[in-house]
Image (cartoon, grey):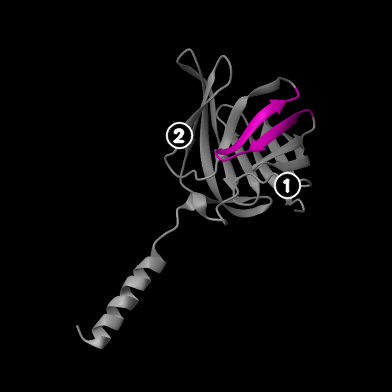
Amino acid sequence: MTRPAVLLAVLLSAGVAVAAPVPKALKKNAPEWMPLTAGSKWEYVSTDDNTVTTDTREITAADDKDGKTTATQRTINLTQEFRRDETGVAVVKTSNRGETKPRYVVKHAMKEGDTWENDLGGYTEVRTVGKVEKITLPAGQYDAIPVKFQYVQNGAAFQSGTVWYADGVGLVRIDTEGGGSEVLKAFTPGKK
């Protein structure tokens, strides 16, 4: 092999090695579908039966320990505790139910077609991820990933809908079949 041919072969093989993709779950800048930073605040506008109301949610406390983050989120009438672990972000406690089995609302490396189930004690929640889409809301335009949910008890579905999450913002929209909708009006990120 001539010297230029060897150099070309080395450059091509180096280019292939550099171009090899890194799995999404291992990237430092992987999407953050649900920020759990203290001070993060969301304001939503809800429409249900021709009634329009506003709701504010805020992360009032967050703690990182042993590779897991726990955060407390308060709304007008509910306090929830979330946990981020190696799987995703789960609700682990609510003020009206106490501690519960982890209910994963998002997974870290979720992609179109992914499905998972949450055992909610007496019924099951099935979540299915759709394709990222551009949506326009009062708070602006976002590339958001839809996650369809369906509650099932004794083999029969009794409620369903879709929630959308935007990278770095979190929950931006909720549509409940046969019910109302909730859309993001404003978002204030917390300080890390």
Q: Amino acid at mark 2?
A: Thr
Residue 177: quarter of image: top right
Residue 142 in the figure: left or right of residue 148: right
- Magenta segment: 77-95
> Which residue corresponds to mark 1?
37
Residue 22 x %, y %: 45, 57
Residue 136 x %, y %: 60, 51
Tell whether position 19 is magenta. no
Q: Which mark is residue 46?
A: none
Residue 156 in the figure: left or right of residue 46: left
Residue 11: quarter of image: bottom left
Residue 189 x %, y %: 73, 52
Quick one: label 1, few (<14), some, or many (20+) residues within 10 Å? many
Q: Quadrant of the N terminus?
A: bottom left
User: What residue lies at 41% left-to-right and 59% top-to-bottom?
Assistant: 21
Residue 114: quarter of image: top left
Q: Amino acid at mark 1?
A: Thr
